[in-house]
Image (spheres, rainbow, N blue to C red):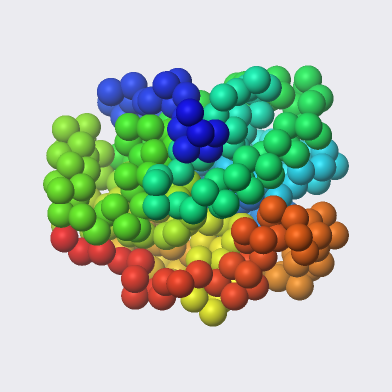
Amino acid sequence: MIKGRNCSLKYMLQEKWAENIDILSDKPIYIIGGLYGNYQSLMKIKELANEEKENPLLIFNGDIHWFDVYEEDFLAIENDIESCIKLFGNVEYELLNKDSLFGCGCNYPENVDESIVERSNNIHSMLKDNITDEGILRNLKNRKFTICLKYLDKKIAITHGDEKNMAGWQCSNENLKKFDRQKEIEHWLEDNNVDILATTHTCLPVLLSLGNKVVVNNGSAGMANVRDTTFGLITRIANTKHKDAIISQEVDGVFVELVKIDYDITEFINWFDNVWTINSPASISYRNRITNGTNISIEDIVITK
């Protein structure tokens, strides 16, 4: 077994996890995946939330932490999101497994280079070494893998990876382009009476439009997502459009959007470089993406069946 290539069987989601409604909401919903310890991004998200006419419901669907390997930075984020809804990502879950065989728990597919997997394991190992306070770990234990909401007349299912596995990659940009996968997820949405499935985990954004149903993956709230840009993205679901949305898909009067989080990149990169030296695993894996974006364009994000 190669650490980082696999995940625990505990990550498998219950077959009927989206059957029951956990929350009824009449407020806009922010789904914040992959913050990755970016405090500047969190401040920008809160700024956008405060500008809304109605206070939105903030849901963090995992991998809140990553670059914040020191307890002071880790706690700064935890304290600022204390009142928000927080789901498990593999980053948080594996902090509870001190003797885990799964490393970072990323469950990387085979097309991800071995050096990337190794660096991710090293980053997570630093988190484990530094985040040892029993109070912090006890708070993490209270998180769930999934949540299901009713917003207006739309049923929204939210998890970290995909509909089967908390660290699954089947809602990636690459996989949702495949016809067989589109049929599979369409059947799952129909069988569970779900209108919108919101995920993250795979680090690249995608929105799959299936007529009156949507699958959305925000990519990363705390890192760049699009070529030649530096902004993060969150998923916003509301009955109005947002001025900073780069993608807006309407479903019967409800807008499913990817909203730009244009945080202070200078402040963040100064912090990042103080934590992660130029030859560190995080700098090698992520610094170029943080400053220059990814290899996809905005046009690559939307898939229409």
The total of numbered circles placed on residues is 0
How far from the left and from the top, in percent, is residue 238?
40, 55
Relative depth, front residue between 305 and 113: 113
Task: Residue at 27%, 54% (x, y): give it.
Answer: 176
Relative depth, front residue between 57 and 34: 34
How far from the left and from the top, in percent, is residue 44?
66, 62
Relative depth, front residue between 60 and 163: 163
Task: Residue at 32%, 36% (x, y): give it.
Answer: 163
How far from the left and from the top, in percent, is residue 153?
27, 43
Relative depth, front residue between 173 and 241: 173
The answer to whether residue 114 is left or right of residue 47 is left
Judge whether residue 244 can be spotted in this image: no
| Location of residue 115 with respect to 246 vertically, above or below | above
- Quadrant assignment, res 102: top right
- Quarter of the picture containing the C terminus is bottom left
| Location of residue 258 with respect to 9 vertically, above or below | below
Judge whether residue 205 can be spotted in this image: yes
Outermost bottom residue: 228
How far from the left and from the top, in percent, is residue 154?
29, 44
The answer to whether residue 109 is left or right of residue 170 is right
Task: Residue at 32%, 45% (x, y): give it.
Answer: 170
The answer to whether residue 147 is left or right of residue 271 is left
Task: Residue at 45%, 52% (x, y): give it.
Answer: 112
